Amino acid sequence: MSPPVSIAHLASRPDLDNPGPLPYVIAGPCSAESEQQVLQAARALADVPGVKAFRAGVWKPRTRPNTFEGIGDDALHWLEAAKAETGLAVAIEVANAAHVEAALRHGVDIFWIGARTTTNPFSVQEIADSLRGVDLPVWVKNPVNPDVQLWLGALERVNKAGITRLGAIHRGFTSSEKMAYRNAPKWEIVIELRRLVPDLPVLCDPSHIAGRTDVLRTLSQKALDLAMSGLMIEVHPEPEKAMSDAKQQLRPDELARLLGSLHLREEGSSVLRTDSRLQELRVQSNAIDYELLETLARRMHVVKEIGQVKKEHNLTILQVQRWQEVLRDRLEKAGDLGLDTTLVRAIYELLHEHAIALQSEVMNDLKT
Ligand code: PEP
Ligand code: MN
């Protein structure tokens, strides 16, 4: 059994200075690269409605050495200048106490702990200790591995140091499975975190989930549909020239279009708004539906491949004995799980009917 969650005294939102009905957006380049790039990005973002804070990486945790590891302390001067000129709050990633101290000397407003750092309790503790007595918002990205307890542990360490303007950022998880995204979203992990700490604001970082730009809108909309509080998005004045994460950064005008296209959904009547248990259950049920649909898509893909094999061996599509076995086995399993077997039978009959239709297309080269 895990120990009880101890995140106490959360401020209602970490962005207390900027509350509002719109999603909270932190945007800016993956890395601060030059004074000109930082100022150009900040000026453009200050004009994008909804952007509340400017992000830039100063020290970059790169997978391999001999790649660009960030400008370091010098970049803090550029961020100070960007803040003075645009009025945007400045957010950076910190990975140790020296980073925190340097950032505080340069008036950084918001901190985040990166995904690699979150995996290491020693580093998180060091950062938490260096933040003691600092009343600034801190966002903790999920660890690279899908471990909700590790994420929660990092949040608890920071909260124990007295940080109440605390939030989490969902940036996806490393996966060995072949997939369309750079990092697997695994929405169920975020849902679990929210179940454990319902008052914790969570942002989505679609840039690091996607690793590309064409799916950012879909991911952002999904995050809002999952009632997340806002977004952290990478934006660069000239993405193709970026020194890190070039493929996933938007231009400022593209961000403006993306934010403008998002549907902000009504959360419903006052009862819906006030009953947090009901809200939480609905978020969970949406996410499970997505999992079901993804599972269904995977099953249909396998069904199609089975059709190919049957074709190669000149086997009939309908294999009565196999169908009898499948149905018996699944109904038994459904009974064990406490499911209504009438419902499960209906679902399987429909699935089987569609599987036969699909395999018949494969078999007869109707559509493949
Ligand atoms: C980043 O925000 O640029 C970054 C390095 O992110 P992550 O820690 O999510 O990889
Ligand atoms: Mn990045």
Image (cartoon, grey):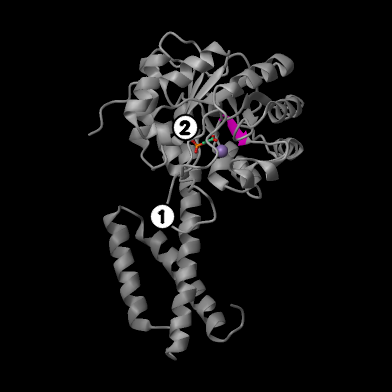
Q: Is residue 8 visible?
A: no
Q: Nearer the viewer, residue 99 or 342?
A: 99
| Position of residue 368 measured from the top left corner of the image (x, y, whole percent) | 58, 77
Q: Mark 2: few, some, or many residues within 10 Å (few <14, many ≥20)?
A: many
Relative to 84, residue 268 above or below: below
Give the residue number, with chain letter if any, for mark 2: 114
The residue at label 1 has a CB less than 8 Å from ligand 1: no
Give the residue number, with chain letter if any, for mark 1: 176
**Image quadrant in which you'd find residue 34:** top right
| Position of residue 331 measured from the top left corner of the image (x, y, whole percent) | 32, 64
| Position of residue 71 measured from the top left corner of the image (x, y, whole percent) | 57, 29
Q: Nearer the viewer, residue 279 or 14?
A: 14
Q: Of the residues shown, which amino acid type is indicated by label 2?
A: Gly
Relative to 180, residue 183 above or below: above
| Mark before the other along the chain sequence, 1 or 2 | 2
Dominant SS in magenta: strand
Mark 1 lies on a secondary structure that is: loop
279 relative to 261 in the view: left or right: left
Q: Of the residues shown, which amino acid type is indicated by label 1?
A: Ser
